[in-house]
């Protein structure tokens, strides 16, 4: 029996969660993955487990054009920048309507700001993510510094002072007239000490909500951290407070930090800017695919471990009544050892009760159909995004590389079949994409633009059954020469994706159900 959207989520027992978490951790630790320098740890057999696929190239028995789809490794997350900008501003505006008086009052007390500890002091494994698809940077990467910006910012402070420990610090008085630029971004200075604790090392990047710097925590053995400095703008500040509040809620629900969600180390106010401090991690999953599985995807054993970790994260969010709202490979971050992944970037996250209907929530390639149709939605949208992400990890290709929402819906039906009429009519936007012809299925209305004339081209379509289903596409990506056990595991993976990518959110598998799927039980 499938849970309906209106059903109350069943919270698994603490023993169940503890056992699943323990099994996932043990499996992740036992599977051998290459380290950051592409070498293999001592005593590890790459035949047992590796990020790269083995047994040669994927099968060419199915039409070659599918193998020539958009590469996940080369996907530019900025493709949908205009829609994404609208989405992020919508999120910020929604945050303005939420009652955050206590947090706002704390923020306004800039005379003597106090750091809010969310996490016990000491080295922790955590991560954070920049909350914009408009970014070209990875806030966790050590080598993402933009030298031109770093050099420019370093000239803003004028003179440099010394701290009691001898560290070079930029004089704050020299910066008093140049803290912010015209758009409200904080002008970071390399060598500056934030909150009398974090020594800025480099500038990592800038997005709609914030800028991000790499710093050393001088009060925690110079541990490297990523600090998100929220833009000095009322809407952005309130969106930042909303992200902070959700991170704190998740930390309370997962005090041991074992559920593979980014953990906020600390929040503080610096020169009127809300700042969020996260542990600096290694690559994101898109970079992992680029490095280890360009065009061919990753070893299925690696995908299985990553899937398990991310499902644990989604189960924590579901039990906390939180939607992530932007799950994609770029927002999933791996450890240096590559055997641990955490879900980051909660800038688009919100409480399920605060969800607002918008066709632009979630980055387009990972956007669930109910969002495009204007339906009420819940945590099932994140399961859909995870399904699309896992497909990418294994195949190295984007599952639904649609140009817009209309094209996305068409690609979904080509792979998943036609939407049920009952589901379509529940959406506020269904008439933008479908027409009622009086038959048993609503006609899909494909809208494209003629390249020569620029005029709209309208075609009416129906999809009685999928022409290229998930199973076929997964088997196509399975290396030639795979053993019967490996093929069986690939079929189980396809079955899991089928459940994650159910068109109807009511039929979509939940995270805890997915963790019990046969894909995770095969040895």
Image (spheres, rainbow, N blue to C red):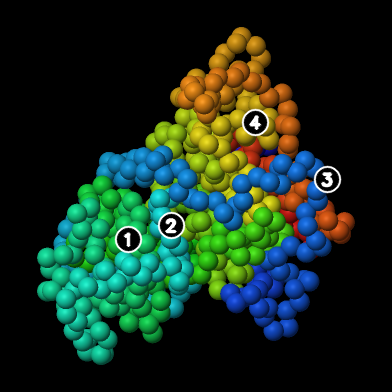
Labels 2 and 3: the sequence-earlier one: 3
Q: Which is more foreground, mark 2 or mark 1?
A: 2
Left or right: 28 as drawn, with respect to 230: right
Would you place residue 69 above or below residue 30 in this image? above
Residue 141 percent coordinates (x, y): 46, 68
8 vs 93, nearest the viewer: 93
From mark 4 to mark 1, how far is it between C-alphas?
39 Å
Query: Residue shown at 56%/32% (left/top)?
Result: 407
* Marks 2 & 1, CB-CB < 8 Å contact: no
Query: Residue shown at 12%/65% (left/top)?
Result: 177
**For the residue carrying disc 3, how many other residues have a C-alpha within 10 Å: few (<14), some (14-19), or many (20+)?**
few
Query: Residue shown at 68%/24% (left/top)?
Result: 463
Residue 67 percent coordinates (x, y): 71, 47
Say which residue label 3 marks.
61
Question: Taking the image as drawn, is residue 12 in sight?
Answer: no
Q: Which mark is drawn over residue 136?
A: 2
């Amino acid at each position: 029996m499938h849970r309906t959207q209106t059903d109350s989520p069943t919270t698994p027992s603490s023993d169940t969660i503890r056992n699943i978490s323990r099994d996932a951790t043990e499996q992740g630790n036992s599977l051998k993955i290459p380290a950051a320098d592409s070498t293999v740890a001592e005593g590890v057999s790459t035949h047992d487990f590796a990020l790269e696929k083995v047994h040669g190239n994927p099968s060419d028995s199915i039409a070659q054009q599918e193998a020539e789809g958009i590469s996940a490794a080369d996907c530019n997350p900025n493709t949908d920048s205009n829609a994404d900008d609208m989405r992020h501003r919508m999120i910020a505006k929604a945050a303005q309507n939420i009652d955050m008086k206590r947090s706002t009052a704390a923020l306004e007390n800039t005379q003597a700001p106090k750091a809010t500890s969310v996490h016990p002091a000491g080295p922790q494994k955590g991560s954070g993510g920049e909350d914009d698809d408009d970014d070209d940077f990875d806030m966790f990467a050590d080598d993402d510094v933009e030298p031109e910006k770093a050099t420019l910012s370093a000239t803003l402070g004028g003179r440099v002072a010394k701290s009691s420990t001898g560290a070079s610090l930029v004089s704050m008085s020299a910066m008093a007239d140049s803290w912010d630029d015209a758009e409200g971004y904080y002008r970071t200075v390399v060598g500056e000490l934030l909150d009398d604790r974090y020594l800025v090392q480099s500038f990592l990047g800038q997005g709609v909500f914030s800028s991000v710097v790499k710093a050393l925590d001088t009060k925690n053995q110079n541990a490297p951290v990523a600090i998100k400095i929220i833009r000095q703008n009322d809407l952005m500040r309130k969106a930042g407070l909303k992200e902070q509040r959700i991170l704190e809620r998740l930390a309370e629900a997962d005090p041991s930090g074992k559920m593979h969600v980014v953990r906020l180390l600390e929040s503080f106010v610096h020169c009127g800017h809300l700042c969020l401090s996260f542990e600096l991690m290694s690559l994101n999953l898109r970079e992992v695919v680029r490095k280890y599985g360009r065009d061919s995807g990753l070893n299925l054993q690696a995908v299985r471990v990553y899937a398990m970790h991310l499902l644990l994260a989604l189960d924590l969010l579901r039990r906390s009544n939180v939607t992530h709202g932007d799950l994609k490979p770029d927002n999933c971050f791996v450890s240096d050892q590559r055997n641990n992944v955490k879900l980051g970037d909660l800038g688009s996250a919100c409480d399920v009760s605060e969800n607002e209907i918008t066709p632009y929530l979630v980055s387009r390639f990972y956007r669930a159909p109910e969002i495009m149709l204007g339906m009420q939605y819940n945590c099932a949208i994140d399961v859909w995004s995870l399904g699309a992400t896992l497909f990418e990890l294994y195949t190295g290709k984007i599952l639904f590389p649609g140009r817009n929402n209309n094209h996305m819906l068409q690609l979904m039906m080509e792979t998943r079949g036609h939407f049920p009429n009952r589901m379509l009519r529940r959406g506020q936007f269904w008439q933008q994409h479908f027409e009622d012809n009086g038959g048993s299925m609503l006609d899909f209305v494909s809208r494209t633009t003629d390249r020569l004339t620029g005029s709209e081209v309208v075609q009416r379509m129906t999809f009685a059954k999928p022409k290229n289903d998930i199973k076929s596409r997964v088997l196509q990506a399975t290396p030639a020469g795979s053993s019967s056990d490996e093929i069986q595991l690939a079929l189980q993976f396809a079955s899991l994706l089928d459940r994650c990518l159910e068109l109807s959110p009511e039929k979509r598998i939940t995270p805890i159900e997915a963790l019990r799927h046969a894909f995770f039980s095969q040895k």
